[in-house]
Image (cartoon, rainbow, N blue to C red):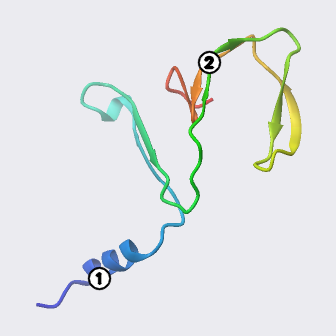
Amino acid sequence: MRPSLAFMLFVALAAAPAAACTNLLVTPGASADGSAFITYTCDGEFHPILRRIPAADHAPGEMQEVRFWDGTVTASIPWPAHSYAVVGLMNEHRSPR
């Protein structure tokens, strides 16, 4: 039996090294119980560190530095009066920061 073109394409893609990441997002309207889900896999050759930033209250005028991946400061922006706890790219209320 000769394999299908779709199967051969799948095998070729599965054998190739990944150059991107996989994200799966389910909105409340798409899940059976109204929950929102987000999951992420690091399929690439890089391995980010999952960090947790605790919630905090900030003084008026307190600034946050925005940096490039190499640590170079690109700008400073004011903090809000209160910032939510963040793990990775998701805050404690399940919305992007």
Q: Is residue 70 left or right of residue 92?
A: right
Q: First in sequence: mark 1 or mark 2? A: 1
Q: Which residue is found at the position 59% from the left and 20% from the top?
A: 85
The label shown at residue 27 is: none
Give percent across and percent down for residue 45.
55, 63
The label shown at residue 84 is: 2
Q: Which residue is found at the position 87% from the left and 40% from the top?
A: 73
* Residue on which the image places disc 1: 8
Q: Which residue is found at the position 29% from the left and 82% from the top?
A: 8
Q: Residues within 10 Å of mark 1 (few under 14, many from 20)?
A: few
Where the N terminus falls, by quadrant? bottom left
Residue 19 appears in which quarter of the rendering? bottom right
Q: Residue furthest bottom?
A: 2
Nearest the camera: 61 or 6?
Answer: 61
Asked if marks 1 and 2 touch (Cβ < 8 Å), the reply is no
Q: Is residue 81 left or right of residue 61?
A: left
Q: Is the residue 63 above or below the residue 45 in the image? A: above
Nearest the camera: 71 or 77?
Answer: 71
Q: Is residue 52 left or right of residue 80?
A: left
Give percent across and percent down for residue 70.
80, 50
Q: Which residue is found at the position 50% from the left and 56% from the top?
A: 21
Please, what is the three-letter code of the amino acid marked with disc 1? Met
Q: Residues within 10 Å of mark 2 (few under 14, many from 20)?
A: some
Please, what is the three-letter code of the amino acid marked with disc 2? Tyr
- Secondary element under disc 1, as helix, strand or loop, is helix
